[in-house]
């Protein structure tokens, strides 16, 4: 707890912060002139967002037990605390951190040591909603009693979808195990109800093929479908169109009649 012009402010000592900061809400009530930095500084706020800041409050007097410790504070939007004291302030006042005793030892301008200790109360009273700092800052949003239901809106809330947009397909191997089990159960339910049937194109005809014990098969002629004579220069060759058993072609092939 620090005092600035007799007004108490809560502070967080952060050794991971390069600079020291002051909350935007608090800076408006300081009564200290701010300066614009020569260039904007990009910092990561406690909310995890990158924020560019350029307002600096120089030599702000932080009072503890009558001792003044000056601080250069940059304006940053954050809550929960009023001040964040970083490494620039700790180095300036030759601070030593004692983690075992949860103390911060500072050195005053006169060379004396000042101790900042963490004190916790063994018994605490239950806090009400009004004691929360965020609620105090927005009392108009948190009334004691609700006046009634919110008024009807001219446009009801809804999520508009583009026409002819299908859900994004997900390959089964990319699904989580729980999603895959749910998908299989849903498909099985559709099969049981008869709402899903296999397409004829997906059915493969099962034709019998006679295979020998040595894993070979023989093509046997079944029927002669047609006859023809192939006339060459010096002689003619009689041909027959043969329908075979265990053959890939179903229409038959032309073969010399002498091969029968």
Image (cartoon, rainbow, N blue to C red):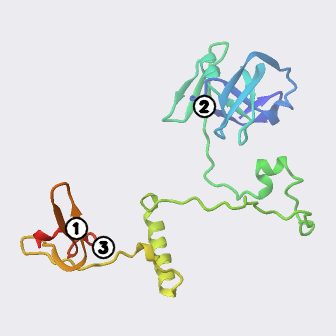
Which comes sooner in the sequence, label 2 or label 1?
A: 2
Residue that label 3 marks: 251
Contact (Cβ within 8 Å) of mark 3 with mark 2: no
The furthest residue to the left: 214
Q: Secondary structure at mark 2?
A: loop
Asked if residue 27 shows in the view, the reply is: yes
**Could you give the CA–CA distance between mark 2 and mark 1, rounded to whole angstroms?**
102 Å
Q: Position of residue 210 (x, y in %)?
A: 16, 78
Contact (Cβ within 8 Å) of mark 2 with mark 1: no
Query: Can you tell which quarter of the image residue 5 is in?
Result: top right
Total marks in image: 3
Q: Residues within 10 Å of mark 2 (few under 14, many from 20)?
A: some
Q: Nearer the viewer, mark 3 or mark 2?
A: 3
Q: Position of residue 173 (x, y in %)?
A: 42, 59
Q: Nearer the viewer, mark 1 or mark 3?
A: 1
Which comes sooner in the sequence, label 3 or label 2?
A: 2
Which comes sooner in the sequence, label 1 or label 3?
A: 1
Contact (Cβ within 8 Å) of mark 1 with mark 3: no
Q: Residues within 10 Å of mark 3 (few under 14, many from 20)?
A: few
Q: Please name whichever residue, 232 or 251, is drawn nearer the observer in this view of the structure.
A: 232
Residue 155 in the figure: left or right of residue 53? right
Residue that label 2 marks: 14
Q: Secondary structure at mark 3?
A: loop
Please name the residue shown 72% across and 37% down the image: 10
Q: Is residue 97 above or below residue 243?
A: above
Residue that label 1 marks: 229
Residue 93 in the figure: left or right of residue 235? right
**Could you give the CA–CA distance between mark 3 and mark 2, rounded to whole angstroms?**
87 Å
């Amino acid at each position: 707890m620090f005092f600035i012009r007799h007004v108490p402010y809560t502070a967080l000592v952060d050794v991971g912060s390069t600079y020291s900061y002051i909350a935007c809400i608090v800076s408006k009530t300081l009564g200290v002139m701010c300066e614009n930095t020569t260039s904007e500084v990009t910092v990561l706020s406690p909310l995890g967002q990158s924020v560019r800041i350029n307002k600096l409050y120089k030599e702000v007097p932080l009072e503890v037990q009558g001792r003044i410790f000056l601080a250069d504070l940059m304006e940053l939007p954050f809550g929960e605390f009023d001040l964040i004291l970083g490494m620039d302030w700790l180095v300036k006042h030759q601070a030593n951190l004692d983690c075992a005793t949860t103390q911060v030892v500072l050195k005053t301008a006169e060379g004396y040591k000042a101790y900042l200790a963490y004190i916790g109360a063994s018994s605490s009273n239950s806090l009400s909603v009004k004691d929360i700092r965020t609620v105090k800052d927005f009392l108009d949003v948190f009334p004691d009693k609700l006046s009634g239901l919110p008024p009807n809106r001219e446009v009801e809330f809804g999520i508009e979808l583009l026409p002819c947009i299908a859900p994004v397909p997900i390959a089964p191997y990319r699904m989580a195990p729980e999603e895959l089990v749910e998908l299989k159960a849903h498909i099985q339910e559709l099969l049981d109800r008869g709402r899903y049937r296999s397409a004829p194109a997906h059915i493969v005809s099962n034709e019998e093929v006679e295979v020998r014990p040595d894993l070979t098969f023989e093509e046997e002629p079944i029927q002669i479908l047609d006859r023809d004579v192939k006339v060459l220069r010096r002689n003619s060759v009689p041909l027959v169109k043969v329908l075979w058993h265990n053959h890939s072609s179903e229409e038959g092939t032309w073969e010399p009649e002498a091969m029968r």
